[in-house]
Image (tube, rainbow, N blue to C red):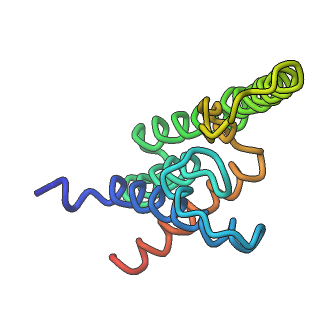
């Protein structure tokens, strides 16, 4: 039963769910295209990773105080996750973009050299995932999402 009343856990999980869900309407506003697959995809605005770790740290701060060793663990964990989301994972996504362009260019060359007999197989290859990481602004708003959502939940529940 302790699991059901673990506020930091539920705040973090709700922050992930909210951040993933809100990507759909935000993308729709930007592109006028509804893409429900964003709910389960990586990358995009806001960062659900950042929302989760800031929600976790905020909830622990509210329950245990900022002097707590649990808050210190959550804060350092959050910094590492957010740094990774905007650094290593973002660069992996940028490399995937370049690789996908190279593959497209290669395919165009092959098509020009040899006309592929009826290329009806729409997708002969699965593109690399380009939306792996986050721009710094996406990490910032993911973090802000986690903090604000946790504060609202704390006011509503306590």
Q: Quadrant of residue 83?
A: top right
Instruction: Give the farthest residue toward the bottom.
Output: 156
Provide residue 61's location: percent of width, then percent of height: 46, 54
Is residue 128 found left or right of 32 in the rendered image? left
Name the residue: 58% across, 48% down: 50
Provide residue 30's location: percent of width, then percent of height: 77, 68
**Quarter of the figure that contains the C terminus:** bottom left
**Quarter of the figure that contains the N terminus:** bottom left
Is 91 rendered above or below residue 43? above
Name the residue: 72% across, 34% down: 90
Name the residue: 51% across, 68% down: 149
Q: Give the mark count.
A: 0
Give 45 or 54, whichever is nearer the viewer.
45
Is 14 rendered above or below residue 123? below
Give 43 or 127, whichever is nearer the viewer.
127
Name the residue: 69% across, 37% down: 130
Provide residue 34's location: percent of width, then percent of height: 62, 69
Give 106 or 92, whichever is nearer the viewer.
106
Give 141 or 128, whichever is nearer the viewer.
128
Provide residue 55's location: percent of width, then percent of height: 49, 56
Instruction: Give the farthest residue toward the front.
Output: 117
Is 26 rendered above or below residue 100? below
Is residue 111 found left or right of 145 in the rendered image? right
């Amino acid at each position: 039963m302790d699991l059901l009343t673990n506020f930091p856990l539920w705040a973090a999980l709700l922050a992930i769910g909210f951040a993933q869900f809100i990507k759909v309407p935000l993308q729709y506003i930007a592109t006028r295209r509804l893409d429900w697959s964003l709910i389960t995809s990586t990358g995009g605005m806001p960062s659900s990773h950042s929302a989760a770790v800031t929600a976790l740290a905020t909830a622990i701060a509210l329950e245990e105080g900022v002097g707590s060793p649990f808050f210190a663990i959550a804060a350092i964990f959050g910094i590492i996750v957010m740094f990774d989301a905007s650094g290593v994972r973002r660069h992996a996504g940028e490399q995937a973009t370049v690789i996908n362009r190279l593959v497209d260019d290669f395919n165009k060359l092959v098509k020009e050299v040899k006309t592929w007999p009826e290329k009806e197989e729409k997708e002969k290859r699965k593109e690399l995932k380009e939306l792996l990481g986050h721009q710094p602004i996406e990490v910032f708003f993911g973090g802000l999402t986690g903090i604000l959502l946790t504060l609202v939940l704390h006011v509503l529940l306590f």
